[in-house]
Image: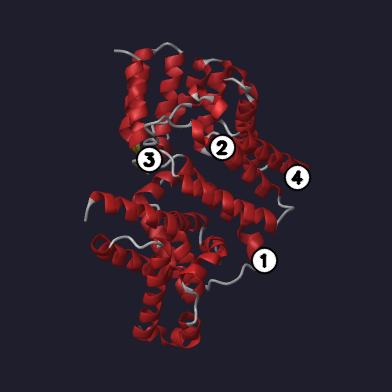
Amino acid sequence: MTTAIARTIDAIWKMEAARIIGGLARRVRDVGLAEDLAQDALIAALEQWPAKGIPPNPGAWLAMTARNKAIDRLRRDANLRRKLDELGHELEDSAMPAEIAEGIQDDVLRLIFTACHPLLPHEAQIALTLRIVCGLTTEEIARAQLVPEPTVQQRIVRAKKKLADAGIGFNDIAPEDFDARLGAVLQVIYLIYNEGYSASSGSSYLRLSLCEEALRLARMLVHMAKEEAEIHALLALMELQSSRARARTDATGTPIPLPEQNRNHWDRLQIARGLKSLETSRNLGGPPGVYYLQAAIAACHARAVTPDATDWPQISALYSLLFELTQSPVVRLNHAVAVGMAYGPSSGLQLLAPLQTEAALRDYHPLWAARGELLYRAERHAEARAAFETAAGMTRNAPEKTALLARAAACGQ
């Protein structure tokens, strides 16, 4: 198999996997089995496409192949004979490829709500959804959750088993399901977005298809629950961040730091949509939630015509409130950076120092990149260079590594 075909198949799989697994889960009512069947379809593509060529509609080919494998699996497996009797007619009469694509949007959202079942611990809900919907590896999920990789593996295996043992199906979302699972679903959607906004590994810094999928899911939730302030806030946050997409990388795909971005390339229409959603969230009342505070921070950046116009004291205050809600070490890191930008790099470095010994952030490259930026602003160039090199050694994303090494080189010897 040529490298080009392998990359094409990988890209197609990343775009289609969640939809295929969602469609299968609706039919076989077992998330773990649905993922296995989808993987079988991927294996078939890896075997057949290099010789026969990539089909005109590869997503539909994968969906149809997975559907056929579901029928074969149910027929073959004696333990699932009862399911075959109940579901065989549904599978036999299910849609052809063009029709499969039409109902696929709800399948992905239902898949997330299924994986976020309250039977599962919160961390397991997140890990399972990132694995199935995002297609992230256990290593990537471990880095996102700041835990060891074996911990993530155990969470995913146990989550699938618990859902299967409990006979948790893949049904329509009942009102009580919506309310009980909404918090976890919002977190998952934002994690999906973040993986697209700043890919944890690979040869691309951005995975815009994931950003677009997260935005689509959030818009669907807004229509389902117009009075939920945090849904509007999450949509506002993602719209505001996405407005910078065209300015975030150069022609080679290397990331451009926020202060150096050409703000003329920011999408003003998307900023307007984000600010409107933020206003809607605020007007719905109640105390500000985690997504409202993050969206308010993004709005401070969006309103700044130039980097110097950024209201860093306000951003610092918002991060302080956000930390009170989350107690997240990553939020503490962002607060330290904001303080450094608002009140001078020495103030930021002072807050950053204790974070360097936190176990959860030991291998977290943004910590060292932030330290490098603050050290550079403090004109401690040799230390800044070392910090950027440390960050470059930790990241698994190739374009980000290139950018960090360039920052290190700019610090001089």
Q: Which picture quadrant has residue 36?
A: bottom left
Q: Residues within 10 Å of mark 3 (few under 14, many from 20)?
A: some
Q: Secondary structure at mark 4?
A: loop
Give the labeled residue for mark 3.
204
Q: Residue at x 45, y 30 (%)?
A: 355
Q: Residue at x 64, y 32 (%)?
A: 299
Give the labeled residue for mark 1.
176
Mark 4 or mark 2, which is nearer to you? 2
Q: Which mark is first along the chain, 2 or 4?
A: 2
Q: Position of residue 106 (x, y in %)?
A: 57, 64
Q: Residues within 10 Å of mark 2 (few under 14, many from 20)?
A: many
Give the labeled residue for mark 4.
286
Q: Three-letter amino acid code at disc 1?
A: Glu
Residue 120 seen by the camera: yes
Relative placement, left or right, of 111 versus 222 is left
Of 270 and 49, nearer the camera is: 49
- Separation of residues labelled 1 and 3 (CA atoms): 40 Å
Q: Which mark is first along the chain, 3 or 2?
A: 3
Residue 321 seen by the camera: no
Of 379 and 325, nearer the camera is: 379
Q: Which mark is first along the chain, 1 or 2?
A: 1
Q: Secondary structure at mark 2?
A: helix
Q: Position of residue 92 (x, y in %)?
A: 46, 82
Q: Three-letter amino acid code at disc 3?
A: Ser
Kindly check if marks 4 and 2 are in contact, taking CB atoms under 8 A apart as contact: no
Kindly check if marks 2 and 1 are in contact, taking CB atoms under 8 A apart as contact: no
- Separation of residues labelled 3 and 4 (CA atoms): 39 Å
Kindly check if marks 2 and 3 are in contact, taking CB atoms under 8 A apart as contact: no
Q: Which mark is first along the chain, 3 or 1?
A: 1
Mark 2 or mark 1, which is nearer to you? 2
Give the labeled residue for mark 2.
241
